[in-house]
Image: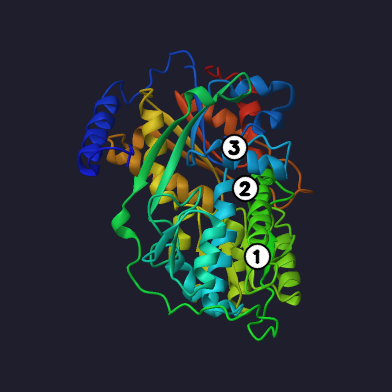
Amino acid sequence: MLATRGPRAAILAAGAAFLLATSACGTTDKPEDSATPQVRLYGTDGNMLNSFPGELKDRGNLVDGMKGTTPLTPLTEDFKERLRAVDPDLKDYLYAAEAYDAVVISALAAQLAGSTDPAAIARQIVGVTTNGQRCTETKVCLALARAGQDVEYRGPSLSRAGFTDTGEPATASYATLHFDDQKINDAKTEFVGAGDESGASTKLPPKPKKQQGGRTDRSDGSPLILGGLLPKTGDLALANPPLAAGAALAVREVNAAGGVLGEPMVWIDGDDGTSVAVAKATVASHIRDKVHVIIGAGGSGISAAVLPDVVAAGRILFSPSNTDSGLSKAEDKGLYFRTAPPDSLQGRALADVMLRDGPDRIVVVARKDSYGEGLQETVRAELERAGIGADRVKLLTYEPPEDAQAAPVDFTGLAKEIKSYGPEAVLVIGFAESAGLITALDAAGVPIRH
């Protein structure tokens, strides 16, 4: 899991030996009269963004030295330039590739199905990524699909292997990120691979339908309509610019390549608000507007909450950024997909990043939702597997804000509890609101290592 080169078994064995060696240092009991140790901060995809220091306002320097992991594939400069053509102010690329691929895969699936019926599209989605003629350019892939040729799409986020039977990536790439001078230091970024290519589906999709003429009779239900369910507001809004840019770029390039089923693909914007109530209202609006595929939601907990509504309406929910492993077993009637990898793959990468620094005591603080608690448990299990016992790991959770108008989370009590425990490492699994925990730690007198 921890490298992209070499035999996977050897890598796992070496990684496990390294983790056990590093975890052997230190003691399990903290002397009562010892001074408060310096604390190294660690983060995840919800806060390892260039926009995150701004959430700390005049104390943005507190994140300097913070490390973390995020699902991220090395992106070409060409792809980044195309994204910046959509949004010249783009500062981050987290999930931009996944958003792009979710839209393109949806378009290809509809073209191969010869229909905009969501059930027919869903039956093609996994097959778009496996067992066909490999193609990497949207224009080429669409041309093959129009000719009735099954395709094996490889895009900026889906580069190694296709989807599993459950409709998610069989493999993933993670980046280890570092904050310096209140921004991600790209020179320190490392990429590691995870997952197993043998996990990709081997099932054959329904036979693709060749497009006949311009399809002007609209018997296929065209145009294909996609609806956004992305975090334009709320605590995950800091991650919205790359998500929105990736989706917009894909729509632009699909339509420049001739669209789907002879007509331009339609995009209807929508906000998930990082809020169940906002997201449900957006889903209801999309259903009224006859949207076929909903791209989102941003957060796993939001998707879990709206998925029953989407499934009941017979629509597709396709997220570029959901990572909760529990969604792999969701009751979705085959209508839920994601281009983001599940946290079962990220937990070991996060544990490795922390254990490289040899902390004696670790605190893992998480949002109290499916994303936060799911990743927290995965990290705990990986730390335990590396030899870090329960007496050296403290798990804490907090209730996240219900919506953008909710009062800020009061982290004062959590900060005091963390200080009393005396850890050397604090992993913060959260979104923008987690900036409040970092400032609370500083206010409580916890020395943060830079």
In-image side of 324 versus 241 (left or right): left
Look at the numbered discs 3 and 1 and tell me whether their residues touch, using CB distance below 8 Å: no
Image quadrant where one finds the N terminus? top left
- Front residue of this view, candidates 425 and 161: 161
Can the viewer see residue 381 in this picture? yes
Look at the numbered discs 3 and 2 and tell me whether their residues touch, using CB distance below 8 Å: no
| In the rendered image, the vertical position of residue 435 relative to residue 265, given as above or below | above
Q: N-terminal of the two: label 2 or label 1? A: 1
State the SS at label 2. loop
Q: Position of residue 163 (x, y in %)?
A: 41, 61
In-image side of 174 versus 383 (left or right): right
- Front residue of this view, candidates 284 and 446: 284
Q: Quadrant of residue 87?
A: top right
Q: N-terminal of the two: label 3 or label 2? A: 3
| Residue under numbered circle 1 | 258
| Residue under numbered circle 2 | 399
Q: N-terminal of the two: label 3 or label 1? A: 3
Q: Position of residue 3 (x, y in %)?
A: 33, 37
How many numbered marks does the figure carry? 3
Say what amino acid the circle numbered 3 marks: Asn
| Residue under numbered circle 3 | 47
Residue lying farthest right?
Answer: 405
Say what amino acid the circle numbered 2 marks: Glu
State the SS at label 1. loop
Say what amino acid the circle numbered 1 marks: Gly
Instruction: Give the crowd class for mark 2: few <14, some 14-19, many >=20 residues within 10 Å.
Output: few
Identify the residue shown where x is 53% and y is 77%: 113
User: Which label sits in the foreground, 3 or 2?
Assistant: 3
| In the rendered image, the vertical position of residue 241 relative to residue 126, given as above or below | above
In-image side of 406 versus 219 (left or right): right
In-image side of 38 versus 289 (left or right): left
Task: For marks 3 and 1, give the CA distance.
Answer: 38 Å
